[in-house]
Amino acid sequence: MSSWLDRLDRRFGRHLPSNLTVGLIGFQGLSWFLEQLRPGFLDFITLDAAKVAQGQVWRLVTFVALPPSSNPIWLFFSLWWTHMLGTYLEREWGAVRYLAYWLVGIAGTAALAVGLHAPATNQYLQLSLLLAVATLDPDRQVMLLVIPIKLKWLAVIEAAVLAFSASTLPGASKVFPLVALSNYLLFFGPSLWATLRARQRKAVHVVEAHRAAQQPGVTTQRKCATCGVTDADRTVEFRVCTCERCGTPTNFCLPHVREHLAAAAPVDAP
């Protein structure tokens, strides 16, 4: 999917507005202002499955413009937060990929709301921005009130709160947060799974190396996989390599393990 979106961005990216996030927070600010002028306006744009079934299909999209807070102070900080996260993603991804991220999230939220006949807000879409930026730049620091905190820890806290809130939802509604974050899972799921598998393989290699070091056959009769020298020569030092290139714990004499690791370094580098 990544290469496909890259091709679309090269072809159509220049035709899309360069400040999609500014447009988004502009609509959210406008909807808050209209609600102050005419109380009840937000009821006209919320995602209500029953009213969608009656033909008010604009609600499948307009719920994105719901203001994140009714309090003007919290609204300002919420819009600033969305602007910071959104513009970062636009700059890193380009307009096409960023727009696709939003469209997938909107479609997932709308489909589930209609399927479960439950109301929905843009809360999970806003959360998906934080998760995306925290995945791309986990060590980025922000100020939480007066406390600096890295985005990765803030994302962990938000994910924990999300899991708790999901557990309190009734029946099939428990899957709502998961489906509503379908954009994040679709864009980052494969890479996160690959990272998890790599860490599992590394942990297995470490355990196998530890077990191999305890076996007499390994400790009393070791043989270098490169030159064939054994530990019968008491002047030779041995090391056990557990890199992915070896696959299984492999013995090397000290000079050849250095050559082996130097050759494997470009392959293992992230």
Image: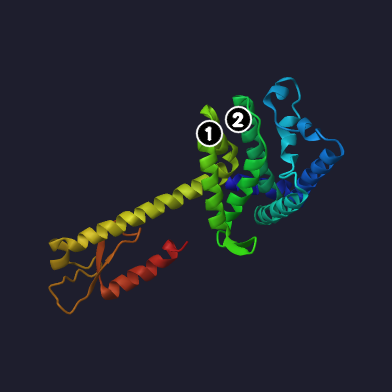
Residue indicated by mark 1: 175
Amino acid tagged 1: Val
Q: How many marks?
A: 2
Res 109 → quadrant: top right
User: In this orientation, does residue 167 appear?
Assistant: yes
- Whether residues under marks 1 and 2 lie with C-beta atoms below 8 angstroms apart, the answer is yes
Front one among 199 and 53: 53
Which quadrant does the N terminus fall into? top right
Residue name at image x 43 percent, y 51 percent: 196
Q: Residues within 10 Å of mark 1 (few under 14, many from 20)?
A: some
Q: Is residue 49 left or right of residue 174?
A: right
Residue name at image x 26 percent, y 57 percent: 208
Vertical placement of residue 240 versus 50, above or below: below
Vertical placement of residue 221 versus 124, above or below: below
Q: In the rendering, at what x and y percent does residue 103 appear? A: 67, 39
Vertical placement of residue 87 versus 58, above or below: below
Q: In the rendering, at what x and y percent does residue 68 appear? A: 71, 44
Front one among 228 and 158: 158
Q: CA distance from mark 1 to mark 2?
A: 9 Å
Residue indicated by mark 2: 112
Callout 1: SS:
helix
Q: Is residue 161 left or right of residue 14?
A: left
Sequence-wise, the earlier of marks 1 and 2 is: 2
The disc at residue 224 is none
Q: Residues within 10 Å of mark 2 (few under 14, many from 20)?
A: many
Amino acid tagged 2: Leu
Callout 2: SS:
helix
